[in-house]
Amino acid sequence: MLNKQVKTTELFECQTPYLKELFDEAEYPWEMLPKIKEYIKTLIAEGLEGFTEISEGVWVGRDVKIYPTVTIEAPAIIGHGTEIRPGAFIRGSVITGENCVIGNSSELKNCVLLNKVQVPHYNYVGDSVLGNYAHMGAGSICSNLKSDGKAVVIHGDEDYVTGLRKIGAILGDHADIGCGCVLNPGTVIGKNTSVYPLNALRGVFSEGCIVKSMDNIVKRR
């Protein structure tokens, strides 16, 4: 039976200095979500070397490219070398690592992106944590609220009662989501796992797999 990893250390290797404390203190990644806003405010108050405040509560690193039609609401920290393309809407409480791509007409809120994450085309990322090199294909979304409005339960090898009404997706390092996918609230994708396009997923998916559908998952060779 494949081990359905859900612990922070099983999903991510955080090498971004200003994010390490957030990751180190969270046994499970969804524990970061209620802390993101205040964590960003604390980092801003303490000062970030090499970052510039472009508007109140919005700090960007070196070589960040932001197109004119982008909207960024505070608080937000955008890591070095990140590109934010036309029409992107960052709704606050967003912090990224280095060299990410936030694409045209994509919307982000209350989320953490590690280094080299790509959400390049028409993506929604709310209340989510995306690992290094995670990629979301065009039109894929992280659905963050159940239809009944109840708290999200993570269904792995056991059930994890989070107590949180809003959890999107947790993507481990190098997770790759195909175009047009819906990741239902509390979906966890393991390291180095790829998902075929047009899937609607829920639950926990082990590392190193190819998810062809909910009932067709194979180990990557």
Image (cartoon, rainbow, N blue to C red):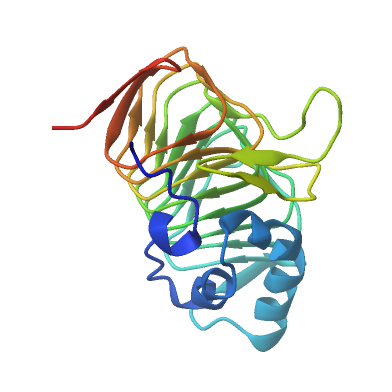
Depth check, front residue: 88 or 11: 11
Q: Could you say which quadrant of the image residue 194 lies in?
A: top left
Depth check, front residue: 34 or 87: 34
Up the image or down, 120 lies above or below 57; here it is above
Residue occupying image coordinates x 80% and y 50%: 163
Position in image of residue 3 (x %, y %): 37, 44
Up the image or down, 49 lies above or below 127; here it is below
Residue occupying image coordinates x 71% and y 35%: 144
Q: Count of labels shown?
A: 0
Position in image of residue 57 (x %, y %): 74, 67
Up the image or down, 167 lies above or below 15; here it is above
Q: Residue furthest left?
A: 221
Residue occupying image coordinates x 40% and y 58%: 10
Q: Is residue 186 left or right of residue 17?
A: right
Q: Could you say which quadrant of the image residue 69 lies in?
A: top right
Depth check, front residue: 185 or 86: 185
Residue occupying image coordinates x 39% and y 43%: 190
Q: Quadrant of the C terminus?
A: top left
Is residue 168 visible to the viewer in this orientation of the structure? no
Q: Is residue 176 left or right of residue 155?
A: left
Position in image of residue 43 (x %, y %): 65, 78
Q: Is residue 220 left or right of residue 56?
A: left
Position in image of residue 38 (x %, y %): 76, 70
Is residue 206 visible to the viewer in this orientation of the structure? yes
Q: Could you say which quadrant of the image residue 214 lies in?
A: top left
